[in-house]
């Protein structure tokens, strides 16, 4: 896909409230479930399915540790996946940055907060693996040219100041680092290549052999993987039917995901015995209300924004868990809130999010004004009510005692014009459930046994986040496990 068309497509999806709201039907496979091809179209050492952050990280890590013949299959016309349009916040303990900010932290604290934030429903061994190895992933990315801002922060729903912001703009910064590494290592990325079958020696036993995929011309092709197949195809946030199967409330919501997030590979892995966990744990984030078209992201820094309902009053502390904020917004009469910040908070946003907010001024999804009263009028909110809310909040900042319990470290006055506001409905953002894996990223079958030759990384997996993913932990997940998985398969 050309640079221009890819940029245009990403821009339209990043700014769209509806995203992709129809399930994708897989092309019919040419082989029966228990029928492997007698002659393969291609043989590789390592096959990776999915060219988002998780897939590219796994491929690059494997190549750096000696794996030579690697192919990545990507069903979309471009690479990057949801990572490329994410905010890119990466939660990790960081002795250097946190040390300069006098923030006390540890992998153990990160693990405890992750487990507690997911109601104890995550696999403690997976959480421990992630939090103990995340800083190595940060350093690994930096060694390849990734740049983070000097200060860490507490991201929306992150519960603690350990989040690293990409220095440039969005999650696309990671892809801009990893793609040249793929080129350097000779990793072949095939786009427009939708996997429709995973071959195993026997349907429920033996080694995974390879896959069948359909190319852009509709031709069925097969690839044999000598070492392993790594599945890194993301979640099912853009598949309303699959979402509704596990949580009917999610059927008609918009999504922040790209069209690729339809969960295609989950049933394919189930077909050969993979177990799943947590499929009904579905997370929402502030997004476009139904019927709107521009997602406004003013909420990333917990210390910088407040949320109000249509009555102009706050209804929940803004540094709460994401699932609690979701439920509070959906309980509002209009199921839509507003996020508000001042010019200082706006200046902290990534350039990409600033551009989105400015576009929202044109679409009627965001507003800016030099006074709170003028802002309220544009929002359609009672100016006196919003003025009283801002005054009460600012007084709480002065007293370091917020009425709704927002942590003192996240209390910053909203006082510097111009002020900004935007719609904050609820959009499906992340699916915490997926295939069961162990700390080595091996896919586990329904009897608790690793499936030989099959690995999974990223949102396609379950058990890492429990009922609720902490903000900043998804990027941590994909790059920490992607790096480790690449190292692991290199030893096969």
Image (spheres, rainbow, N blue to C red):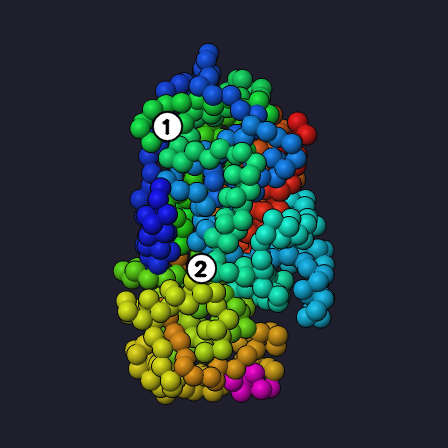
Q: Please identify the quadrant where the C terminus is shown.
A: top right
Name the outermost residue toward the front. Answer: 184
Q: Are marks 1 and 2 in contact (CB under 8 Å)?
A: no
Q: Is 474 rendered above or below residue 60?
A: below
* Element type where label 2 sits in the image: strand
How many residues crowd mark 2 within 10 Å: few (<14), some (14–19), many (20+)? many
Please tell me which residue is depicted at 68% across the width and 65% down the height of the picture: 98
Q: In what quadrant of the picture does the N terminus appear?
A: top left
The image shows residue 448 at horizontal and vertical percentages of 62, 31
| In the foreground, 130 or 488 | 488
Residue 209 placement (x, y as % from top left): 53, 21
Residue 177 at what x, y percent from top left?
54, 49
- Name the residue located 47 percent from the left edge and 21 percent from the top edge: 42
Residue under label 2? 285
Range of magenta residues: 393-399
- The answer to whether residue 326 is above or below residue 310 is above
Label 1 and label 2: CA atoms lie apart by: 33 Å
Confirm whether the magenta stretch covers residue 395: yes
Task: Find disc 1 in the rendering and name its residue.
Answer: 214
Mark yes or no: residue 309 visible.
no
């Amino acid at each position: 896909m050309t640079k221009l068309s890819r940029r245009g497509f990403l821009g339209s999806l990043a700014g769209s409230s509806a995203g992709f709201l129809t399930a994708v039907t897989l092309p019919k496979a040419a082989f029966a479930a228990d029928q492997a091809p007698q002659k393969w179209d291609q043989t590789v050492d390592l096959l990776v399915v999915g060219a988002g952050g998780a897939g590219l990280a796994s491929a690059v890590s494997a190549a750096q540790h000696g794996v030579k013949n690697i192919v990545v299959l990507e069903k979309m016309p471009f690479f990057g996946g949801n990572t490329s349009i994410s905010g890119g916040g990466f939660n990790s303990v960081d002795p250097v940055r946190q040390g300069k900010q006098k923030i006390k932290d540890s992998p153990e604290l990160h693990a405890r907060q992750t487990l507690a934030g997911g109601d104890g429903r995550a696999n403690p061994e997976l959480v421990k693996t992630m939090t103990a190895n995340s800083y190595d992933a940060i350093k690994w990315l930096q060694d390849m040219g990734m740049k983070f801002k000097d200060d860490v922060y507490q991201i929306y729903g992150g519960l603690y100041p350990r989040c690293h912001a990409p220095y440039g703009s969005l999650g696309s910064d990671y892809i801009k680092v990893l793609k040249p590494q793929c080129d350097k290592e000779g990793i072949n990325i095939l786009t427009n290549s939708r996997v429709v079958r995973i071959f195993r020696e026997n349907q429920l036993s033996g080694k995974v052999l390879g896959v069948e995929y359909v190319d852009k011309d509709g031709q069925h092709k097969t690839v044999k993987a000598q070492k392993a197949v790594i599945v890194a195809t993301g979640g099912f946030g853009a598949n309303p039917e699959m979402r509704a199967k596990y949580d009917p409330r999610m059927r008609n919501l918009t999504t922040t995901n790209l069209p690729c997030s339809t969960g295609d590979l989950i049933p394919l892995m189930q077909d050969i015995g993979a177990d799943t966990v947590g499929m009904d744990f579905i997370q929402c984030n502030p997004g476009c209300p139904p019927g709107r078209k521009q997602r406004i992201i003013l909420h990333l820094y917990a210390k910088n924004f407040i949320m109000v309902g249509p009555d102009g009053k706050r209804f929940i502390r803004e540094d709460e868990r994401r699932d609690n904020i979701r439920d509070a917004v959906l309980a509002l009469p209009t199921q839509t809130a507003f996020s508000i910040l001042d010019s200082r908070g706006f200046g902290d946003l990534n350039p990409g999010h600033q551009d989105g907010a400015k576009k929202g001024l044109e679409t009627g999804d965001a507003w800016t004004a030099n006074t709170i009263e003028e802002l309220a009028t544009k929002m359609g909110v009672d100016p006196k009510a919003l003025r009283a809310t801002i005054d009460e909040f600012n007084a709480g900042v002065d007293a370091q005692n917020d009425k709704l319990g927002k942590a003192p470290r996240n209390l910053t006055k909203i006082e510097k014009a111009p002020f900004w506001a935007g719609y904050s409905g609820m959009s499906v953002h992340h699916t915490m459930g997926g295939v069961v894996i162990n700390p080595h990223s091996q896919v586990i079958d329904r009897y608790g046994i690793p499936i030989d030759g099959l690995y999974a990384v990223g949102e396609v997996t379950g058990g890492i986040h429990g009922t609720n993913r902490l903000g900043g932990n998804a990027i941590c997940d994909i790059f920490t496990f992607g790096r480790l998985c690449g190292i692991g398969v290199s030893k096969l």
